[in-house]
Image (cartoon, coloured by chain):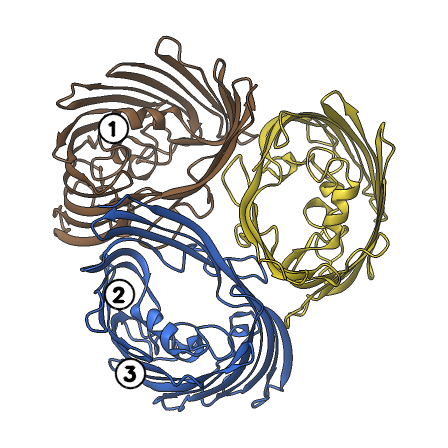
Chain colours: A blue, B yellow, C brown
């Protein structure tokens, strides 16, 4: 075994933008215009690795989301809300981690979302469990979780996560993924199973229900541009479900790049609460770590859908009335350290 | 362009003192003596800069206040309560920052307060919005703020800050400053405009009022001593206002220095709630980063004024009854890292 | 004086384990089996020292406990809940610290607990104030505390801590210790005095009572194994008290070590709420900083005692019914950075 090496790193990201948003009028609610300084998945953390010899490493991560605009934690109760984990990985046998962990959906989304989970076109709003999406979306994270990630075998990587219920009536969950990478192609599939209450997301109030979400994602780099696709279905026992997806593209433009996405989310509830999102962004790098960007987005809501535009939808007055549309313009700055 | 350089720094300050405080009797309330271990604007943070070439830099700051005596955050909801910001600065064009930011009052106070915003003579108690000063004081900080700071032009620096209301009924605010520095002279002026509710500070309950605060500050270094002066007026539409100020001095004494201040705060309310503070401190450096200090202070309160002595006034039993005076003795330690 | 040197360090520990626990049936409550992913005294912190010359140093510590399994702080209100202190130490005169500090019980326990305050055999559960032990245990920490630690004189070290009441009806506390170290022997004694309410721990509701706790600890390294012993008595004025202690052993085993402990806690309340704990652990180091471990434990509860097994007893469903026993199996990983 070679000499043991190790590192501990303090790291993070600050992303702040000015968002000018127009909510259309619906019923008795008149149209309105609002402006926000918003934070977009800003975070700080500590991570480290220790080389144990023979191809084995120990590693850990503590990461906390915060809002640049207010100094508030993204989640005050769960301060390290963006993974708190410790584990071992071996070059031949894969990795095993314990903690509060992102599901395999997050790793896949970073391969197939042209907006990389940030900005007006981020896939967070329409497809991620929580917020206005309620329980009809992929699960981003589980506490009390054990995860195994296989090594790459001919381009294939398998992942299995199990989150313990710990004696609670509603609780245990699983998330399983298969990914394939080769040259310019990426393909991924994630399947989530979890028990939850059906009270959220305009669902009828169900005591404890089985929730199943299956996602497929792909990207292919044609050099002149990169193409992205996503398809998802979410079902709740004894209630209605969701089908959705998007197509996206990334095009180099001078020093920067243009990203665009068109997203569709259909819910088979009586109100037919469908949503569509179209967003275009120009991202201009000042360095590898610092970028300026500008975006426009159009969110259309039907029935009871009330999706706002990311990231201003996380603000106190950032969401439209049910069935109202949202148009937005954004200019922002991102810095990674 | 030269080679890009960057730095990320973990930094902070711990300041703890033993405070022995005597509250005078007033009406039916007898006099009392209390002792506190108190923390004084202790904080930790992460800050960094990245050189982008051509005189342009990106920079950020995350800073959290905490209490050394209890381990509690100064502000649990707003964990990074001492600025959370990201921005760009150019040597010829000035800086633009986005985030939760100190108003220009804070930068000016560090130039004109002989106690440097700490210790029994700190200008925080009588003149800063919040605490017993209520809305009759300068605003220390705004969330959702954009700030521009000009480069220095013949010694003049201009600052303009705007904080968005984000759709809230009470909200948007502005703070504007002009500073002049030349050799041993500093002059500054800050003007705050903000909308707020008049419910705080013994004000009559007003739904939403315009609040205007204008401050002037100055310092001059006579070598044998340094002289400081401050004047402030705060007005609330449809209610009463405040006029105040201080004179202070810093005198080198052996390896250390002696600081003294006399502060006046007059409120034109029916009860005539005026306050006076006199404080003297000896600060003894053990190194550039570590100091020991001792202070005495006398706070006089009239009418409904109930100001305690900084920093023990932030404690659970740290404030006097209305109209009672406070005498205090302090010995403490400060360490910067 | 030599050149001044200083250091600031970001450090921490993550300890996560899978705990399978069986609660015995008692009365109408049937037996049950639960599994937990649990965090064991995980923490992160910042600490530093500054050499001031002439044998004098300034130092500080900020340390926050968190749960690896959920990302939540161990104590959300008191974020830096594992000491927040600043002080001076001199090689000839000892150290003086101000802040939120561990009592001398903690330093002693790290010398006499074979489980080093972690794992199923940790002395935290039965003997430390708080949790199911209520007020009948040693005090782990005081806020608003001043502590003096003497230098070592012929192997003897004295410690005195005083925590201010700060005007609260229930508050001030003291903790005093004497330790002796020589070659392979350690002896220690700690005496705590504090005022508290008797409402906790199944005590009758007393307004404000004197609480006295005396602890003795010892360890001796016989080379082939290391032997540990502890004895404690806790008394509350006008109510019942506790007597307890343990014997423990550490035995080298290959690259690792085996730890075992047998603990006794007797309470002289009418229900005779006694408890016994037996635990064995095998600790296997992968490096100086990373270890894997496995344990079994058996907690017996009589009367109103309802102690769970550490660390799963800190979880939502981690404690047994009153008088029920607990058997547990644990496998975990610890990483220090």
Is any atom of residue C93 visible in this view? yes
Q: Earlier in the sequence, mark 3 or mark 2?
A: 2
Give the residue number, with chain letter if any, for mark 3: A239
Judge depth for marks 3 and 1 and give the one in front: 1
Give the residue number, with chain letter if any, for mark 2: A170
Asked whether, in this view, residue B210 is left or right of residue A90, the answer is: right
Do the CB atoms of the residues marked 3 and 2 lie less than 8 Å apart? no
Q: CA distance from mark 2 to mark 1?
A: 38 Å
**What residue do we see at 34% from left, 32% from top?**
C129
Classify 10 Å Cα crowding around label 1: few (below 14), some (14-19), many (20 and above).
Answer: many
Looking at the rendered structure, the secondary structure element under dot 2 is: loop
Q: Position of residue C258 (x, y in %)?
A: 14, 33
Q: Decide: is A228 above or below C301.
A: below
Q: Decide: is C278 above or below B163.
A: above
Q: Decide: is B251 above or below A176.
A: above
Q: Nearer the viewer, residue B240 or C255?
A: C255
Give the residue number, with chain letter if any, for mark 1: C113
**Quarter of the figure with residue A107:** bottom left
């Amino acid at each position: 075994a070679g000499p043991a090496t190790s590192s501990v790193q303090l790291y993070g990201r600050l992303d702040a933008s000015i968002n000018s948003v127009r909510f259309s009028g619906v019923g008795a609610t008149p149209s309105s215009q609002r402006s926000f300084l918003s934070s977009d998945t800003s975070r700080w953390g500590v991570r480290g690795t220790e080389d144990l010899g023979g191809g084995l490493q120990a590693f850990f991560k503590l990461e906390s989301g915060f809002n640049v605009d207010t100094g508030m934690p993204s989640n005050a109760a769960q301060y390290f809300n963006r993974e708190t984990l410790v584990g071992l990985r071996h070059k031949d046998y894969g990795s095993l981690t314990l903690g509060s962990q992102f599901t395999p959906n997050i790793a896949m989304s970073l391969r197939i979302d042209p907006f990389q989970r940030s900005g007006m076109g981020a896939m967070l709003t329409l497809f991620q469990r929580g917020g206005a999406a309620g329980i009809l979306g992929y699960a981003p994270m589980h506490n009390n979780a054990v995860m195994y990630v296989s090594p790459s075998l001919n381009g294939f990587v398998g992942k299995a996560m199990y989150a313990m219920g710990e004696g609670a009536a509603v609780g245990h969950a699983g998330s399983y993924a298969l990914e394939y990478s080769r040259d310019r192609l990426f393909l991924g599939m994630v399947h989530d199973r979890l028990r939850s209450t059906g009270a959220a997301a305009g669902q009828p109030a169900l005591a404890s229900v089985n929730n199943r979400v299956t996602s497929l994602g792909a990207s292919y780099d044609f050099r002149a541009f990169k193409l992205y696709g996503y398809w998802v279905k979410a079902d709740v026992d004894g209630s209605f479900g969701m089908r959705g997806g998007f197509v996206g593209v990334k095009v180099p433009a001078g020093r920067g790049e243009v990203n665009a996405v068109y997203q569709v989310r259909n819910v088979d509830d009586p109100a037919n609460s469908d949503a569509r999102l179209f967003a275009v962004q120009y991202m201009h790098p000042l360095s590898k770590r610092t970028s300026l960007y500008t975006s426009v987005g159009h969110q259309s809501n039907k029935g009871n859908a009330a999706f706002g535009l990311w990231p201003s939808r996380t603000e106190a007055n950032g969401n439209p009335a049910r069935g109202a549309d949202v148009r937005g313009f954004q200019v922002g700055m991102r810095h990674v350290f």
